[in-house]
């Protein structure tokens, strides 16, 4: 069933290119909960969004696609009127999706290490390690990022370091320490995670969905990690400012 659901979501996302309302058949309009604050509720909201986006002759590249129980989550590249990178998360009941989250930002980079926001491995492996890898990432986010215990940072990475795809980062645990501890002129953390909402996993790929502040702006953080031998070896991310509630087109919240 997971492969079928992945195919349905790929068809849905590719429907953005054509504006084809038929691509939304995977959506259950009677139950659909939309967590993108700028999109209206239900299948009609998606159909309207597709029609609006199709005017820009968009291109959609689904770089990575995963499943975790009733969830399908993808790493995507969009070329609308501007190029963007996103993560899309869908929750299924049966053959239809009933809930959606996303996190999209402008495409930036390459970073100082020469990596783009999407390049790197795409194939899932180590399915038997899914739960162990999920707990590893949960531990990293909670212990190091949320609780700011940077003394534990090196414990999560191998001696060879890791591959960093964040446009503001580079392949260095030392640089990561600097980024996680950097403060504003007022002494506040520049990147300040406040809550981990959900950790999704398939094999060696783990997605952490978190909330906090960047430069004092309420933001959502999606972090995708690749795991090897119980170490974090590769990282991709997107950061998106969360609009003021007065600007929301639905009442479901970002998370």
Image: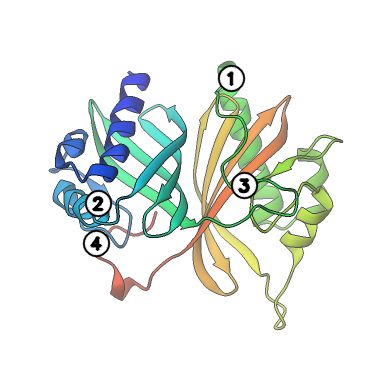
Q: Quick one: SS at disc 1?
A: loop
- Given residues 102 and 12, the one toward you in this image is 12
Q: Which residue is mark 3?
A: 116
Q: Which residue is mark 4?
A: 250
In percent of the image, x 58 and y 57: which residue is there?
Answer: 108
Between circles 2 and 1, the one closer to the viewer is 2
In the rendered image, the quadrant that contains the C terminus is bottom left
Separation of residues labelled 3 and 2 (CA atoms): 26 Å
Q: How many marks?
A: 4
Which of the marked residues, 3 or 2, is nearer the chain's N terminus?
2
Q: Which residue is mark 2?
A: 54
Separation of residues labelled 4 and 1 (CA atoms): 37 Å
Q: In x, y percent, where is residue 196? A: 53, 51
Contact check, label 2 and label 4, Cβ < 8 Å: no
In percent of the image, x 20 and y 36: which residue is there?
Answer: 23
Q: Which residue is mark 1?
A: 125
Contact check, label 4 and label 3, Cβ < 8 Å: no
Separation of residues labelled 4 and 3 (CA atoms): 33 Å
């Amino acid at each position: 069933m997971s492969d079928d659901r992945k195919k349905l979501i790929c068809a849905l996302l590719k429907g953005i290119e054509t504006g084809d309302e038929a691509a939304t058949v995977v959506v259950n309009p009677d139950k659909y909960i939309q967590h993108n604050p700028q999109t209206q509720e239900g299948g009609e909201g998606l159909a309207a969004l597709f029609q609006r986006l199709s005017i820009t002759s968009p291109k959609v590249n689904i770089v990575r696609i995963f499943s975790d129980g009733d969830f399908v989550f993808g790493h995507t590249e969009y070329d609308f009127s501007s190029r963007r990178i996103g993560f899309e998360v869908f929750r299924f009941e049966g053959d239809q999706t009933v809930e959606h989250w996303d996190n999209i930002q402008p495409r930036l980079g390459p970073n100082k290490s020469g990596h783009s926001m999407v390049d790197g491995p795409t194939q899932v492996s180590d399915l038997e390690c899914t739960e162990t890898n999920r707990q590893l990432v949960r531990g990293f986010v909670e212990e190091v990022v949320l609780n700011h215990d940077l003394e534990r940072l090196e414990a999560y990475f191998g001696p060879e370091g890791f591959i960093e795809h964040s446009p503001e980062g580079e392949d260095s645990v030392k640089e990561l320490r600097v980024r996680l501890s950097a403060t504003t002129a007022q002494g506040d953390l520049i990147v300040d995670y406040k809550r981990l909402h959900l950790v999704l996993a398939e094999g060696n790929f783990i997605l952490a969905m978190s909330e906090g502040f960047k430069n004092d702006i309420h933001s959502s953080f999606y972090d995708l990690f690749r795991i090897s031998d119980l170490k974090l070896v590769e990282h991709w991310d997107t950061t998106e400012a969360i609009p003021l509630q007065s600007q929301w087109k639905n009442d479901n919240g970002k998370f």
